[in-house]
Amino acid sequence: MNARAIVTITHTGSSPLILSNHRPGALIIAATGSDEIIRKCNLVWGVEPVKIEESRGLIETVRLLRRRLTESGFSKGDRVVFISSMPFTKSDSANMIQVTKI
């Protein structure tokens, strides 16, 4: 798929840990509103934690993350995979994958 990054919006930190075990070629970005999860993800191989404000919806959060990726050097056309749980505000296991281009 040649994604430049895999962005997991996480409430528990489990998804970045599972992704890290597979050692993907893409950067793993763990987006969370929890300082505890940020600290946990700092210890996981290949995971770059990013602090985000808690939001009510997936669309708003993905829009915010796309903007932050662009500001951090991602280019138009870069492929990014977003992983999250649905319904969004629950911390159940990740069950949504969205592949998109910046």
Image (spheres, grey):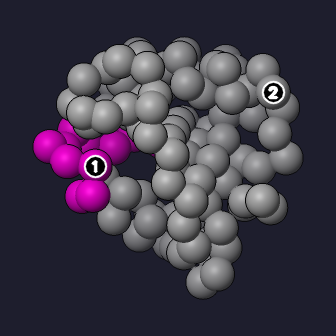
Examine the rendered structure and indicate whether residue 61 appears above or below residue 92.
below
Q: Is residue 55 magenta?
A: yes
Q: Amino acid at mark 1?
A: Leu
Q: Residue at x 27, y 58 (%)?
A: 59
Horizontal side of 16 relative to 98 (left or right) equals right
Is 69 on the left or on the right of 18, as rendered?
left
70 on left or right of 91: right
Residue 52 position by quadrant:
top left
Given contact means CB atoms under 8 Å apart, are the residues at marks 1 and 2 in contact?
Answer: no
Image quarter hosting the C terminus:
bottom right
First in sequence, mark 1 or 2: give its number: 2
**Secondary element at tag 2:** loop
Question: Quick check: can you spot residue 45?
Answer: no
Residue position marked by numbered label 1 in the rendering? 58
Q: Position of residue 91 (x, y in %)?
A: 32, 20
User: Disc 1 to disc 2, how far (Cα)?
Assistant: 25 Å
Q: Residues within 10 Å of mark 1 (few under 14, many from 20)?
A: some
Task: Answer whether residue 42 is magenta in the image.
Answer: no
* Residue bearing the label numbered 2: 22
Q: Is residue 29 above or below residue 45?
A: below
Quadrant of the image occupied by residue 24: top right
Foreground residue, 67 or 85? Answer: 85
Q: Position of residue 4 (x, y in %)?
A: 72, 60
